[in-house]
Image: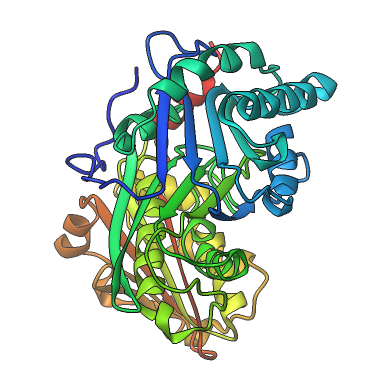
Amino acid sequence: MLDTSPLAPDCFPDLPPVAGLDMAVSEAGIRYEGRADLWVLRGQPGTEIAGVFTRNNAPGAPVIWSRRALTARVHRGAPRLIVVNSGTANVFCGRKGVQAVCETAQGLADVFGGTPESVLISSTGIIGEPLDPSRIIHKLPEMKRGMSDNLWEASARAIMTTDTYPKGATATADICGRTVTINGIAKGSGMIAPDMATMLAYIVTDAAIGQDALQTMLNEFNATSFNAITVDGDTSTSDTVLLVASGTVGYDKITDAADPALTDFKFALSSVMLDLAHQIVRDGEGASKFITVNVAGAVSDQSARAIAFSIANSPLIKTAIAGEDANWGRIVMAVGKAGEPVDQDLLTIKIGPYILAANGALSESCTGAGVEAYMKNAGIELFCDMGLGKGCFTVWTCDLTRRYIDINADYKS
């Protein structure tokens, strides 16, 4: 059992029930002993779901299945079902992996109703080990009897692998004079980099919003939350973020993401997604520092994004910060290797409030007690002003410590 990250929040937030949705967890013994490793979420008939998935070219069978299920025609009276297991990713398992997904979906449909096409499946854990679907199917009747609308923390724990704490967030918003709830849970600790990472995230709401509008909003806010974080630069094969709307709040369903009635909802949704994304970084394997990388003054937002990720993914920068060393030369290196336009005479680099380099030269504030003391903080902010344009982007990451090596060297044992 891993020690809880020093960057973890004090406690799991109080996530309220969301009308039209219930859930159950179980110990299926897929890999872990004595802990929940299986979660089922059920949405009432008419529930809408949007999703984004990994862009890794070797995705797992659950991702391939869920991409199709997301757009499959679902019987009007059928529930929408999501099942998640931890411990085995069911990736690169050939026909056995595909068969495991098919049998799991059929098992859900047999127990909860509907068709296999109405089931979305996520798996996380070891790559290359086939999933035994019988372990899941055996637990489903018991889980159906134990469905509850108030198992959020238990659900967040059930989807964990190397996570050291469960991750949740909640918010409310106003739509057409009605209060709607947004809850989210996520898992992720290592193999974190766009697009997206070894992360799973499930955001749910009782708002009445059509799938197309949900998908548009999810795509937009995913770009600046889950696709703006990195722990180690490795993109997983299993990434899934789903946005689920039960539609129980009483107003006419909104089908256009540009509808002004969604203004407050968009702010709340983006806040929940960013909160979960930050928690994933704070639980980065072996992390001791939470790092914000701000790049401004680039020739475009895309250029700023490339530079920010070049900095955030640099092992030299991440290890320097772990050692509490304000090594600004490594930041210059990372800016230059991004392959984006740079004018050294216009570049400004700051760590926290301290300007370390400006106008192509070392700043007098680069050394001294102030910057040394700042580097001992748990939160570190890096800032680069390229001086070339209006492009900007922010990426969040963590430091790279010896503990990261320990965790990953022993992960399969």
Question: Is the N terminus in the top left, top right, bottom left or bottom right quadrant?
Answer: top left
Q: Nearer the viewer, residue 65 or 90?
A: 65
Is residue 290 depicted above or below 266 in this figure? above
Of residue 21 and residue 62, the one placed in the foreground of this image is 21
Compared across the picture, whether 118 is left or right of 360 comes to right
The structure residue drawn at horizontal position 83% and vertical position 24%, both measured from the top left corner, is 94
User: Which residue is at 75% across, 41% downward?
Assistant: 64
| Closer to us: 91 or 1 | 91
Q: Residue 383 lies in what quarter of the image?
A: bottom left
Figure check: 304 above or below 210: below
Most extreme residue toward the front is 77
Whether residue 2 is situated above or below residue 347 in the rendered picture: above
- Residue 100: x percent and y percent? 72, 21
Q: Residue drawn at (29%, 46%), measured in percent from left and top?
A: 17
Asked whether 346 or 12 is in front, the reply is 12
The answer to whether 403 appears left or right of 233 in the picture is: left
Taking the image as shown, residue 302 lies to the left or right of residue 180, namely right
Q: How many marks?
A: 0
Residue 162 rendering spot, x and y as whole percentages = 44, 27
